[in-house]
Amino acid sequence: MREITKAQLTIGLLAYFATIWEFLFHLTDTNNFLFTVGIIVLQLILLLVLAYIIIALLEWVKVFDLKTNAILTLLILVTFRLLSTAGIA
């Protein structure tokens, strides 16, 4: 597996697990289990796709190395996810 693919998967999963806990607290109030599971799976897919796109764009520009791009992507994804949970973005 290529290094960029490993970084994309790792950053997507890290962002997912860093932001899903707050989301679970809000969804456990509802009684619809399938809705909760569906939202959790959609969040995973969304963060993996966004990690793939952002790291690919940063690697295409080639301003920083892969490690710096991965850290920037993680910060962007977690910030975006927390802001969207708060209703700001």
Image (cartoon, rainbow, N blue to C red):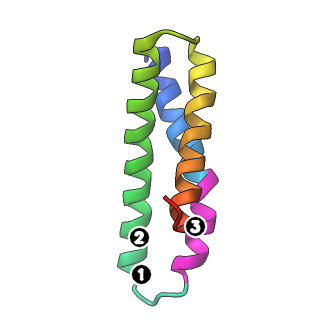
Q: Amino acid at mark 1?
A: Phe
CA gap, disc 3 and disc 2: 20 Å
Which residue has dot 2 on it?
Answer: 37
Task: Please tell me in which quadrant of the rendered image residue 65 appears.
Answer: top right
Considering the whole magenta stretch, tell me its main secondary structure.
Answer: helix
Closer to viewer: mark 1 or mark 3: 3
The vertical placement of 31 against 63, above or below, is below
Identify the element where label 3 is drawn: helix
User: Which residue occupies the extreme front position in the image?
Assistant: 88
CA gap, disc 2 and disc 1: 6 Å
Closer to viewer: mark 3 or mark 2: 3
Q: Tell me which label, 1 or 3, sits earlier in the chain.
A: 1
Q: Looking at the rendered structure, which numbered label has been put on residue 86?
A: 3
CA gap, disc 1 and disc 3: 23 Å
Q: Tell me which label, 3 or 2, sits earlier in the chain.
A: 2
Q: Is residue 53 left or right of residue 20?
A: left
Give the crowd class for mark 2: few <14, some 14-19, many >=20 residues within 10 Å.
few
Give the magenta part as a residue range: 18-28
Identify the element where label 1 is drawn: helix
Whether label 2 touches label 1, CB < 8 Å: yes
Q: What residue is shown at x 53% (from left), y 54% (from top)? A: 81
Identify the element where label 2 is drawn: helix
The vertical placement of 48 against 80, above or below, is above
User: Which residue occupies the extreme bottom position in the image?
Assistant: 31
Q: Is residue 28 left or right of residue 45?
A: right
Q: What residue is shown at x 56% (from left), y 78% (from top)? A: 26
Whether label 1 touches label 3, CB < 8 Å: no
Q: Does residue 30 show up magenta in the picture?
A: no
Task: Return the x and y of residue 25 as percentages of the image width and height.
Answer: 61, 76
Task: Return the x and y of residue 77 as percentages of the image width and height.
Answer: 53, 44
Quadrant location of the N terminus in the rendered image = top left
Which residue has dot 1 on it?
Answer: 33
